Image (cartoon, helix red, strand yellow):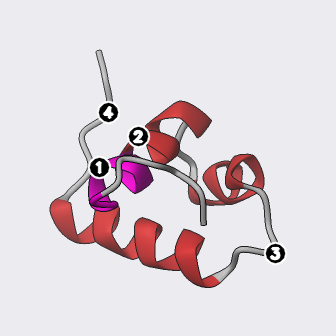
Amino acid sequence: MAKRFSPEFKQQAIDYALSNSHESVAAIAQKLGVGYSTLDKWIRESNPTGSSKR
């Protein structure tokens, strides 16, 4: 069964990833305990252009 994350956690993870662009998305995802693809998807969904580029 998939883990469920609160909207607050998702937003904090996105904010952290965007403000720490010197770290890889994979390293941040591991640090936060989420999958790389999950964090990448959250970042893409939060970006109007649909890109995960930070």
Residue 43, given in percent of the width and then of the height, sits at 42, 55
- Give the mark, 4 or 1, whose residue is nearer the N terminus: 4
Residue 51 relative to residue 47: left or right: right
Residues in magenta?
42-48
The residue at which mark 3 appears reads as 22
Alpha carbon separation for disc pair 4 and 1: 18 Å
- The majority secondary structure of the magenta stretch comes to helix
Q: Are marks 1 and 3 in contact (CB under 8 Å)?
A: no
Alpha carbon separation for disc pair 2 and 1: 6 Å
Closest to the observer, 25 or 32: 25
Does residue 26 lie above or below 1 as drawn?
A: below
Please report the residue visible at 44 percent of the width from the left and 78 percent of the height from the top.
Answer: 15
Residue 45, given in percent of the width and then of the height, sits at 29, 49
- Image quadrant in which the N terminus is located: top left
| Disc ID at residue 41 | 2
Local crowd size for mark 4, using a 10 Å CA cut-off: few (<14), some (14–19), many (≥20): few
Residue 7 relative to residue 51: left or right: left
- Give the mark, 2 or 3, whose residue is nearer the N terminus: 3
The nearer-to-camera label among 2 and 4 is 2
Snapshot quadrant of residue 19: bottom right
Alpha carbon separation for disc pair 2 and 4: 15 Å
Check disc 1 and give the amino acid type: Glu
- Image quadrant in which the C terminus is located: bottom right
Local crowd size for mark 1, using a 10 Å CA cut-off: few (<14), some (14–19), many (≥20): some
Does residue 14 lie above or below 30 as drawn?
A: below
| Disc ID at residue 45 | 1
Please report the residue visible at 31 percent of the width from the left and 23 percent of the height from the top.
Answer: 2
Check disc 2 and give the amino acid type: Lys
Check disc 4 and give the amino acid type: Lys
- Give the mark, 1 or 3, whose residue is nearer the N terminus: 3
The residue at which mark 4 appears reads as 3
Please report the residue visible at 77 percent of the width from the left and 57 percent of the height from the top.
Answer: 24
